[in-house]
Image (cartoon, helix red, strand yellow):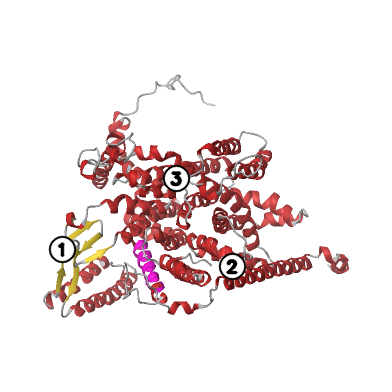
Amino acid sequence: MATQQTIAEGAAPRVPLLYDPRVRGIAYQILVFVGLFAFVYWIIGNTTANLQRANIASGFGFLQGRAGFDIGDSLVAYSSDSTYGRALYVGFLNTLRVAILGIITATIVGFVIGIGRLSKNWLINRICLVYVEVFRNIPPLLVIFFWYFGVLSVLPLPRDSIELPFGSYLNSRGFYFPKFLWGEGAGLIALALGLALVFIWFVRRWAAKRQAATGDRFPVLWTSLGLLIGLPLLAFVVTGFPLSFQFPALSTFNLQGGIQVRPEFLSLYLALSFYTAAFIAEIVRAGVLGVSHGQSEAAHALGLRNRPTLRLVVIPQALRIIIPPLTSQYLNLTKNSSLAVAIGYPDLVATGGTTLNQTGQAIEIVAIWLIVYLGLSLATAAFMNWYNARKALVER
Amino acid sequence: MQEHDLSFVRAEMVASQAPPVAEHGLVPWLRKNMFANVVDTIFSLLGIALVFMIVPPLVQWAFINAQWTGSDRTACATLAQGGLQPDGWSGACWAFVDAKFQQFMFGRYPSAERWRVYLTGFLFVALLVPMLVPRVPRKGLNALLLFVIFPVVGFFLLSGGAFGLKPVATPLWGGLMVTLVLAYVGISVSLPLGILLALGRRSHMPVVKLVCVVFIETMRGVPLITILFMASVMLPLFLPPGTSFDKLLRALIGVALFASAYMAEVIRGGLQAIPKGQYEGADALGLSYWKKTNLIVLPQAIKLVIPGIVNTFIGLFKDTSLVYIIGMFDLLGAVRQNFSDANWASPQTPITGLVFAGFVFWLFCFGMSRYSIFMERRLDTGHKR
């Protein structure tokens, strides 16, 4: 040992400075840093010069200016007299709306198709395969166009609307369905729903404890369903049916009343859901196939039947594989919702684009886009990571 | 030793028998694969109903009722819409695709110069096919031709302005040609750039690592449209006053940078899957960083992530359709642009055009994914468990 150390100590200074990995590393980094700094400096110089020439004042002051353009689809009060800031906020809410609804639908459709792909039934398997291979291999923008130009815009005019069940209508201006008008005492129903959820939580805890202690099982699922439907229903009856509908009715040129879902939203929502569902289906399939066969064999050897094997052994392990790629699909859907601009659905990118054209504040608008989308990405990633950490394999 | 009487042992084999009748043929197959139990039967019946709901009308629309020839909208519009078809008619308007085919392929590229596009396409296929077939030798030379010589030749052929070729400005380019140019450049830039970014992200130098992480995460965190808007609106701002910048080039830069961030993450996955022993073995042999990376690490890492790389390529190919939004007319853009042609406006025109564009995109993407499966099987050395 001692001789080795002396050699090592004696050898160290003999390395020329040029070949010392540490010195080299630092030199490279300084080089990169200086290069990057110079590049950014050059860009900033050019940009200020360009902005001065174009007479554009930088800064976010423009957000207070009058927007002057109308937005067809808005969740909050908005008129062309509102500010640019308000317009961007409306766009942001629209992005969130289509993203959230799309994620829910895509998850449901994706899981159904993914499970269908695992089916031993040849026909179901093939149908799901065709679905996946078709939607995975065409651009989402094309799917959006397909719904918008191919399906929804060739529907009949409002006066020959297609009648659907429950007093809803479909025509070239969108989908109309009755509006729910809650009357007196409707708060009680919501309260009952909340109460049911609390009860379910307690029942689950109690049932788990009892099963751990005695081995007796309690029909948690049926009790929960009963509570979830029964309590609000009871409240509904007690308060004397405080619900009425406002049906859409045909007037001279358009349908009046009810709730209108515009074709822009509908096509974007349908396209994103169906497109993303194909990817989710493949993720689900890979996740279930990723659970090793030995696991279900062991469960069967322990005497578990098919259903409990799936529920207790396969699915929890499959979820571990499914969740990380599922997160990135959710993010993709959210980002793809920016394709709205191609069909005129007023999302963040579309309203931002209009603002950009009117004010020329390119840098500020792009910065807002970056911040919002990065923020959404990070928030979704954080939530899914938290969920993933709960589900992840706990090892020594 | 006792003597055995072996006379009961059979000397010759029994003639093989046909399998039981209930095990082969169509009916048992159906019983096993579609009607195994009650639930299965219900699902199969639902599936059959679904197929019957979708397939016959689709065939009816796309082939039987379809209008294959015609010179204007009257061929594809019903009497009520001012056309020739009977009322209530619904069929694909392939006449529209036929009439606009040249535009869907080349955009507004001057017809006298289209031989240049054909020649470029021919060169590309002639170089690509030997590259893709594993048996063809001289891959190095082939790659050099495809990725270094071909872009130069292709650039001069398509845009002209030298060697006596008439210049064709990029705003005249369009259709499938632009889609393929975008995809080719995006793919050949994003792979090397993605490798560099992935190596940078795994680097021990904090500054390099930080730069790569920030770049990758920003690109992956925002939609491609914002990157394209950025490339089309902000790039001119970043450059010295007075420099003009080609629109197609801006889109190319945007697409390539975007794809390279995704590529970097895929490659990083491969790099992380290489056992530490490989790195240490290379170090023990005294290889330099680049020799270690090129000879030991990357060949193994890239082989592992071929499916991911091809998926990124497919994503890139599909994403090229977004350039329509910044005002360029790729295949989808050219189709979309022609909806507003009054000469062909009919309810069937948009959907036919979109089905055609969808089919072209589908062919390319499906082809890529099949090739990746083939490569994956071929390169599988059996080390993977």
Q: Nearer the viewer, mark 1 or mark 2?
A: 1
Q: Quadrant of residue B94?
A: top left
Q: Residue furthest left?
A: A240
Check disc 3 and report the residue beneath it. B361
Left or right, residue B73 beside residue A257: right
Check disc 1 and report the residue beneath it. A251
Instruction: Report the Cα–Cα distance between label 2 and label 3.
Output: 32 Å
Residue B48: give x, y in percent of width and height.
Answer: 26, 41
Q: Chain of mark 2?
A: B
Q: Residue at x 47, y 50 (%)?
A: B329
Considering the image in quadrants, where does the N terminus of chain A appear? Answer: bottom right
For the residues beneath circles 2 and 3, the answer to whether they share a chain is yes
Classify mark 2: residues with Cα within 10 Å, few (<14), some (14-19) or many (20+): few
Q: Amino acid at mark 3?
A: Phe
Q: Nearer the viewer, mark 1 or mark 3?
A: 1
Q: Chain of mark 3?
A: B
Q: Residue at x 32, y 49 (%)?
A: A150
Check disc 2 and report the residue beneath it. B214
The residue stretch that appears in magenta: A88-103
Please, is residue B75 above or below residue A359 in the view? above
Instruction: Report the Cα–Cα distance between label 1 and label 2.
Output: 56 Å
Of labels 2 and 3, earlier in sequence is 2
Q: Main secondary structure of the magenta part?
A: helix
The front one of B177 and B283 is B177
Q: Quadrant of residue A251?
A: bottom left
The front one of A286 and A88 is A88
User: Which secondary structure lies at badge 3?
Assistant: helix
Residue A384 seen: no
